Amino acid sequence: MIRARGLTKTFHRKKETVEAVKGIDVDVREGELVAFLGPNGAGKSTTLRMLTSLLEPTAGTAEVAGYDVARDPARVRSRIGFIGQGNGGGYSYRVLDELHNQGRFYGLPPAEYTRRATDLLEALDLGGLEKRTVQSLSGGQRRRLDVALGLMNHPPLLFLDEPTTGLDPHARANLWEHIAAMRERYGMTIVLTTHYLDEADSMAERVVVIDHGEIIADATPDALKHSHADDVITLAVVPTAGGSSVAGEGAGAVPDVVGRVRASLAEDVGQVETTSGADGVVTVRISTTHGADRLPEAIETLRVGGLAVRSAELKQASLDDVFLNLTGRSLREEAA
């Protein structure tokens, strides 16, 4: 559905040249939902604008929905839907008029664009709002109208540029529920940009991580977390009655237990760290893959070593951990 090679965009300003996208290669297969994830200014939106033929590449090629974006931009646009960051509807126009105008733009006959508008209003919970002006809609309703406008031509490929920016959590979840339903209904391929980690993790089948105009990772969310981040198990332990001390003269038991943990989780263990508290409680932190599976094994290993677990916590790897390990920066902080 998408094949881009060496895609580059350079902007020339008065005193500097900015290479916003640096020769990226990317493929999207038919039916996929792919998220471009990265901080503001990473090159996500610039990439999308080139793939939708709205911005001419400085170098490289891109074939989208069977057509070259530079040679056949009109054909590309006829085969895609694009929902940008701003609201697409005319501020003072009525909802139904906006949809009909979109249908006319695509050259649909009146009977067809009327039918499609009615279907989309119903499917996106906009029924009863046909005569309302766009400016009178809530933020969530406006974004659902944007989705309806983007689907009037029944595109096989839909681009969403930061679709939920500015929406509250409830409106975000509601919009994604509708997008998922539309995807299933029309069998669309979807490419989106986002800096929301939860969206990329829960919605996307593949995540393309972009930073400083370059693709630095491309895989499923689970594969990215498995390759570039660890789960962290944190256990607070004390000696059992008759067991080895973990402080004072018996402090040698701690490295022994660390060794046991390493041996028990040999295939998956990363770092094992211990911190002794003044109350005799030792905190054991274990970095490992598949933390949910390894937690019971770690507890049993400590029990056999004469230690009782007072508390246990599992922090599963996140896409923010992936971004932090790849770039040295937190995407949550960048997006804040």
Image: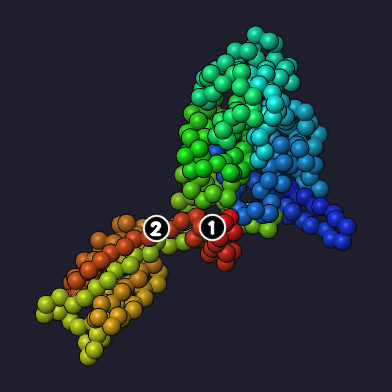
* Residue nearest the viewer, comparing 2 with 42: 42
* Element at label 2: loop
Residue drawn where x is 30% and y is 80% of the image? 277
Q: Give the left or right position of residue 273, taking residue 112 as reference.
A: left
Q: Amino acid at mark 1?
A: Arg
Rate crowding at label 1 as few (under 14), some (14 to 19) or many (20 or more) other CA atoms within 10 Å.
some
Question: Which of marks 1 and 2 precedes in the sequence?
Answer: 2
Please tell me in which quadrant of the rendered image residue 310 appears.
bottom left
Residue 328, compared with residue 88, is above or below; it is below
Please count the marks in the image: 2
- Residue drawn at 11 percent across, 77 percent down: 241
- Pick out the residue farthest to the right: 14
Residue annotated with mark 1: 332
Q: Nearer the viewer, residue 87 or 189?
A: 87
Task: Name the residue beneath numbered marker 2.
Answer: 316
Q: What percent of the width, then of the height, locates residue 15?
A: 87, 61
Residue in view at x 53 percent, y 18 percent: 128
Image coordinates for residue 174, horizontal then vertical, percent: 48, 35
> Disc 2 residue type?
Gln
- Most extreme residue toward the bottom, as rendered? 249
Quadrant of the rendering where the N terminus is positioned: top right
